[in-house]
Amino acid sequence: MVKAVDSLRKTLELLKHILADEGLNRDTRDRVDECVRACLTGIEALERERKELKLSSPNKFKSTMHRVAYPFKKDTLDKVKKTVGELLGHLSLTVQLLGMREGSRHHSESLAAVGAVRQEIQSISGQSDTIRDSVEAVRKQHQAVSDATGAIHAETQGITDRLGQLQIDGRQPANDIRQLLTEAEAEKLRAILTWIKAPDVTSDHNVARRACYPGTGQWFLELAEYFLWKYGSTSCLWVNGKVGCCKTVLSSTIIEDLRAYCGHRWDRTLAYFYFTFSDQRKQSREELLRALVMQLSQGRPAVKSLRDTFAREYGRGLTEGQLEIALTEILEMLCGS
């Protein structure tokens, strides 16, 4: 019974803290206060009875004495038991009131949360409509841009075609170095180029290009010195390096850049040569001259020195001196035009 009373006291202390919650409404607070006051009154009566009965935490001796004295104190203990029962009833009511109040608060909070979620859903729905409208507007703009791009592309193609025609027309004058060859001239040129017996320069170039990765040598193409040489401000560009430092690969990058540049210019011509230790025919000045003469003669009527030498010494072939004369004549024709 002592333990039961102590438990009631601790529970009441807890209720005291709960009552400090400002969220309780006034009716609930008044009813709980009434129950607590009734419990306090009952506890005071129990304290008086405990002192009268001299009850305390039992030990072996006192327990024996209590059992002996029990018949004489039975009525008093029954009264105490009744009081404790009443206190428990009050306490049960208090707990029920607080439980109802807590449930009501949770319910209110749930309703408020549901309302907030509903508003959020409505807001998201409105945003979704706005996003859908924006996407549709972007789609229409994209379609308009695509249509405009198609029109620009068609217009650009027309301009390109007209420029091509103008370029062809500009190549027609008799003094133009790229005048169209007649069938007889073309046949004569093929015979002369075969007679020159120039070494194949494309094989070394193709090997060098296979050793390149995308962007290899791009840094060199961006140098100011290369820019000035490419566009004619300087006449010579000397690139040197030790054996094995990839000069051949770098040269192939330069040749590809110049090939693209000359392909768009009717007044520009490209010729190149690779000296290599792996091919004896590509180690002399004479073979260099043969390769340059052949490349620079492509697509043009053969120069006079080549025609005369071919007619006069077809069976013997060209000497280094004759090749030099022919190359000089080709370069003069190119520079003079």
Image (tube, grey):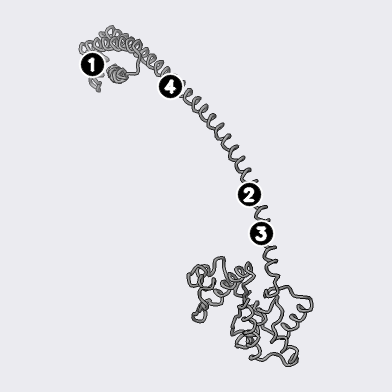
Depth check: 153 or 245 in front?
Answer: 153
When the figure is inspected, residue 5 is found, relative to residue 250, above or below; the finding is above
Rendering coords of residue 70 (x, y %): 27, 11
Rendering coords of residue 28 (x, y %): 35, 12
Label 4 and label 2: CA atoms lie apart by 58 Å
When the figure is inspected, residue 105 is found, relative to residue 150, above or below; the finding is above
* Number of the label disc, if any, that sits on residue 55: 1
The residue wearing badge 2 is: 149
Residue at disc 1, secondary structure? loop
Label 1 and label 3: CA atoms lie apart by 116 Å
Label 4 and label 3: CA atoms lie apart by 73 Å
Left-right relation of 53 to 4: left
Rendering coords of residue 71 (x, y %): 28, 9
Disc 3 or 2, which lies upstream in sequence? 2
Residue drawn where x is 60% and y is 41% of the image: 141
Depth check: 253 or 103 in front?
Answer: 253
Within 10 Å of the Cα at label 1, are there few (<14), some (14-19), or many (20+) other Cα atoms?
A: some
Disc 4 or 1, which lies upstream in sequence? 1
The residue wearing badge 3 is: 160
Residue drawn where x is 31% and y is 9% of the image: 34
Q: Mark 4 or mark 2, which is nearer to you?
A: 2
Residue at disc 4, secondary structure? helix
Residue type marked 3: Thr
Image mark count? 4
Depth check: 144 or 39 in front?
Answer: 144
The residue wearing badge 4 is: 109
Residue type marked 4: Glu
Residue type marked 2: Thr
> Is residue 210 something one can see in this rendering?
no
User: Do labels 4 and 1 touch, CB within 8 Å?
Assistant: no
Q: Mark 3 or mark 2, which is nearer to you?
A: 3
Residue type marked 1: Leu
